[in-house]
Structure formats: C-alpha cells, structure tokens
Image (cartoon, grey):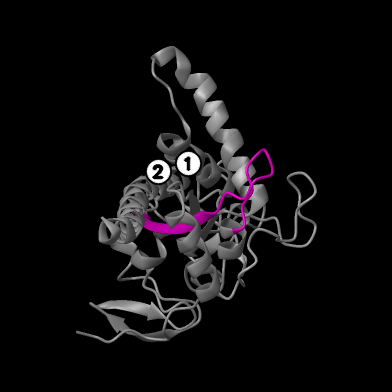
Amino acid sequence: MVESLLALPVLLFFGFVIVQVGLLWHAKFALTHAALVAAQQGSLSHGSHQAIRDGVIRGLFPLFGRAKAPSELGPELLRASLEVSRGIALGWIRWEVISPTQQSFQDWGERADPLLSPGVALGDTEIPAHGVAGLAGRRKPKTGIAEFYQGLPVGSASGQTLLEANNLKVHLQVGIPLQMPVAGQVMARALSLWAGCGFGLTHPARPIGLVDFGRDADPSRFHPSIQCRALSNFDDRGRWAPRWPVGASAVVQMQSNARQSLMVLRDRQQSPTKSSP
C-alpha cells in the first residue's frame, strides 16, 4: 500500500504529461491547416497581409470556434476573430512570410501594369505569376545569375529561381493552452528555462489592457520573446494560463502576382547558393 501511494502520483503525473503532449500534437494538425488556409488566401490576393490575417482567423476556427449548428457559424466566427485579435495583442499568435523576401523582388520584381493588375499603385513592383512556367527559363534575375538549378537561373540576391520566388511560404506560431493540472505548469516552467525566459512566469511585465507598449505589435514579424509571451499568458480573470508555442508552415504557389506594397517582407536568410544535382 505504501509503495502504491508513493508510485501513484508519479504515474498520474506522467499520464498527464502524455495526455498533454497528445493535445499539443492534435493542435499541430490544426495549425498546419490554418497555415495552409492563410497561404491560400494570400496567394489569391497578391500576398496581401490582410488576406493572410483573414486566412489565419478562418484556419484557427477549429481551435477557437464551437459552432454546433449552421446558424451558429457567424457568431462563432466573430468570436474566433476576437480571440485571434486577443492572441495577437498578447503576443501568443504570430505569423511570418518566409518567401518571397525583399531579395526575391530585387531579382524577379517588375513594374506592375495597371491594365493587367487592377488596383495596383503607380510604380509598384510585382513578381509575375501567370505563365511563370514559360518565363522561368527565359527571364534573367536583375542582380545576376549565381548558378543554374535544374536548368533555371538562380538570382544572386535571393538564391531563388523565378518558380521558387512564386511560392508563398507562411509560418504560423500559436500558443496552445496547457490544460492538464500540474503537468502543464511543469512543462511550461521547463520550456521557460530552456528558452531563457526565466522561472518567474507568473509575474511577467503586464500589458495595459490588450496593448503592451514595450514591444512591437506587428503580428507579421516574430518577436524574440514570443515563447515568453505565450508561456506567461493570463486568462480573463488574471490567472496564470501558460501556453505552449506550436508552429506550422505551408507553401502554395501564387495564383496572383505577388505585390510588394501589400506584403510584410523579411530579408533573405537562406544559404547563398544551392548545390546542383
């Protein structure tokens, strides 16, 4: 009996850990779907930041929405939108456009034609998406050819072919609630120490309402302390409710010209060249 009493808490703890890991793994599939929806929305709207945001809201509906009948879809979608906005403000929802980059437009961007691209601003730059299969072998990058990859020229600045520059890659990261008692808190503190956030997660720098004046509020750029923000999350009642950061990426081919003015772009971070087969 004594041995059972000593072993039971340990077994329960590891059982809770296994269940919590299973919940996080389930959320990973939902995030993969959300990243794909966001990328698809962006590909149809010139890579627009707002279109990607709308895709994130729709893609995360399975996590935040609880509609049980068709008549409840509208209110639940609004509730999911508010929850995503809250996550953005508190720092546990972030996404980033991995490709195309600033250098992709340097290599493959061209002056947009208002007749072919309605709504484009004068002097705006786009990467062509229509007929790109035929253009990829004939068009040369503006910054020079670094090498050839599968017979296609690779831009010196971007390290991409025209086909690769036409791929919209979105990475989404969301803090998933750690719901299991004890196990969730232990996992949160362990990840906090591993990520360099410290151990005192229950006393972080608190925001004023939903606005934190001490950091960048743009959800399209990863903040260095995104893990810390997720792990030190508070619920509506002011109680510590840690979230485990889970990420997923999706790549889709652009169905419209990638428009530089509508996108939040980052600098290239890939290796300078590819190894030819």
| Residue farthest toward the top in the current orientation of the protein | 71
Q: Which residue is mark 2?
A: 37
**Magenta segment boundaries in residue numbering:** 232-252
- Placement of 272 over or under 29, stated as above or below: below
Q: Are marks 1 and 2 in contact (CB under 8 Å)?
A: yes
Mark positioned earlier in the residue sequence (1 or 2): 2
- Placement of 269 over or under 47, stated as above or below: below
- Where is residue 187 drawn, in percent x and y? 45, 62
Res. 171 in view: no
* Residue at point 64%, 48% (across, down): 234
Q: Which residue occupies the foreground of this view, 81 or 170?
A: 81
Quarter of the picture containing the C terminus is bottom left
User: Image check: 84 left or right of 245?
Assistant: right
User: Image check: 146 left or right of 222?
Assistant: left
- Placement of 201 over or under 140, stated as above or below: above
- Where is residue 147 drawn, in percent x and y? 34, 86
Residue flagged by tag 2: what amino acid is it? Val
Task: Name which quarter of the figure residue 61 lies in.
Answer: top left
Identify the secondary structure beneath mark 1.
helix
- Where is residue 139 drawn, in percent x and y? 38, 71
Distance of mark 1 from mark 2, alpha carbons?
Answer: 5 Å
Q: Which residue is mark 1?
A: 55
